[in-house]
């Protein structure tokens, strides 16, 4: 493993090469646009650099490097335009991951654990291969695709019941906005990676051990994530006819896992609170949509009472509230 000083030099060299070559390519590209020349005249640029995708990269990468918004996908895509940048990508992938991917991949710790579930290196081993980071980028792309479908099919139809939406969202808004808020998006991504990881684990003991490491609060989110409509779950976006059998197999696997997660959550709730878990998805069905209730910002206060042990049949002064069950669980802002 390279020392911190060596990593710093690699990072600075990578960025220096990236910035210099991008500006050079931009200048050559603009000159070529103004004064067209034969393709062999500019041997610095590959023919692929003339594609619309590469053109966008040439003009957007410098500003992102300047203000720290460069993404792993930018580095990976731009590396394909120039041989020297490919060398930087393959030789410095560990440093690129540490300084770029960690701040640009939402819920990166869980995304990293999921890579291990996919037979990738253990989290403590670090990212050593470009293929590992590429796989994480593909995973992230699939999660974002699920979010787009979720926003289209579910979020736009969410109800808030008797709750005042403007207290949780924008002033003057009537109902939930047609998109996930920042905190809702993080809840979705975190739960999606956890569900996906459980589906990847074939060993029942490994699944049980994974569930035991999850807080009661997150188990509630995980239950709801496992009830996503068919076709929206992990690995279920199969379009071809040849993939119909695979699609059905994955849906059935998620349904079986969903039942197991709910049973575990109910047993954990009884063990902690000495009573059965409330059927909140039935009681408050007019405050969400299609089995989606506790994900929303406007339901977090109610969820907090459920997780911490609200006793609705007793006077307020006798309620036993285990606030640590909420405070000690992961924060959506992390």
Image (tube, rainbow, N blue to C red):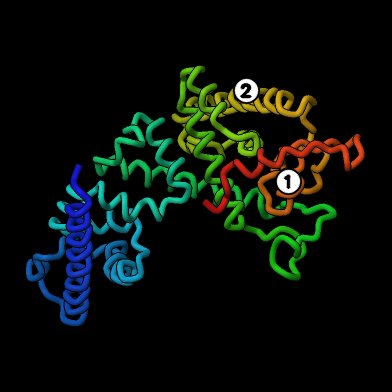
Label 1 CA crowd tier, 10 Å (few <14, some 14–19, many 20+): some
Q: Is residue 246 visible?
A: yes
Q: Which residue is mark 2?
A: 260
- Viewer-closest of 213 and 150: 213
Q: Quadrant of residue 57?
A: bottom left
Q: Position of residue 304 (x, y in %)?
A: 72, 44
Horizontal side, residue 281 vs residue 58: left or right: right
Q: Position of residue 83 (x, y in %)?
A: 13, 56
Horizontal side, residue 15 vs residue 100: left or right: left
Horizontal side, residue 25 vs residue 100: left or right: left
State the separation of the CA atoms marked 2 and 1.
Answer: 23 Å
Q: Position of residue 267 (x, y in %)?
A: 69, 23
- Secondary structure category for the residue under label 2: helix
Asked if the residues shown at circle 2 and circle 1 are in contact, with their CB atoms under 8 angstroms apart, the answer is no
- Viewer-closest of 85 and 128: 128
- Secondary structure category for the residue under label 1: loop
Residue displayed at 67% across by 23% down: 263
Q: Quadrant of residue 127?
A: top left
Residue displayed at 77% across by 36% down: 309
- The dot on residue 289 is 1
Q: Can you name the residue that lies furthest to the bottom here?
A: 34
Tell me which numbered mark, 2 or 1, is placed earlier along the sequence: 2
Q: Position of residue 252 (x, y in %)?
A: 57, 24
Q: Quadrant of residue 21?
A: bottom left
Residue displayed at 69% across by 67% down: 170
- Viewer-closest of 85 and 216: 216
Q: Can you name the residue that lies furthest to the front here?
A: 317
Residue displayed at 31% across by 50% down: 98
């Amino acid at each position: 493993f390279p020392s911190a000083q060596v990593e710093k030099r690699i990072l600075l060299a990578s960025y220096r090469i990236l910035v210099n070559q991008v500006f050079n390519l931009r200048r050559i590209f603009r000159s070529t646009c103004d004064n067209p020349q034969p393709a062999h005249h500019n041997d610095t640029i590959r023919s692929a650099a003339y594609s619309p995708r590469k053109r966008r990269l040439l003009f957007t990468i410098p500003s992102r490097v300047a203000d720290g918004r460069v993404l792993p996908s930018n580095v990976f895509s731009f590396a394909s335009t120039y041989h020297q940048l490919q060398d930087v990508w393959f030789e410095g992938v560990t440093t690129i991951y540490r300084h770029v991917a960690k701040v640009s991949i939402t819920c990166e710790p869980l995304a990293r654990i999921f890579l291990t579930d996919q037979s990738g290196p253990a989290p403590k081993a670090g990212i050593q291969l470009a293929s590992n980071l590429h796989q994480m980028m593909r995973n992230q792309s699939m999660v974002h695709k699920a979010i787009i479908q979720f926003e289209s099919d579910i979020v736009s139809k969410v109800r808030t019941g008797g709750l005042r939406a403007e207290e949780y969202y924008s002033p003057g808004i009537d109902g939930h906005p047609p998109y996930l808020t920042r905190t809702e998006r993080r809840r979705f991504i975190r739960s999606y990676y956890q569900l996906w990881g459980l589906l990847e684990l074939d060993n029942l003991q490994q699944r049980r051990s994974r569930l035991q490491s999850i807080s009661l609060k997150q188990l509630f989110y995980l239950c709801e994530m496992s009830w996503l409509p068919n076709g929206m779950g992990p690995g279920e976006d199969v379009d071809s006819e040849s993939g119909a059998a695979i699609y059905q197999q994955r849906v059935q696997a998620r349904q079986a896992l969903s039942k197991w997660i709910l049973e575990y959550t109910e047993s954990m709730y009884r063990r902690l609170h000495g009573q059965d878990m409330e059927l909140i998805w039935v009681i408050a069905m007019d405050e969400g949509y299609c089995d989606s209730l506790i994900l929303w910002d406007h339901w977090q206060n109610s969820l907090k009472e459920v997780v911490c042990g609200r006793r609705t049949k007793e006077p307020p002064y006798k309620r036993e509230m285990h606030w640590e069950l909420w405070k000690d669980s992961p924060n959506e802002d992390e």
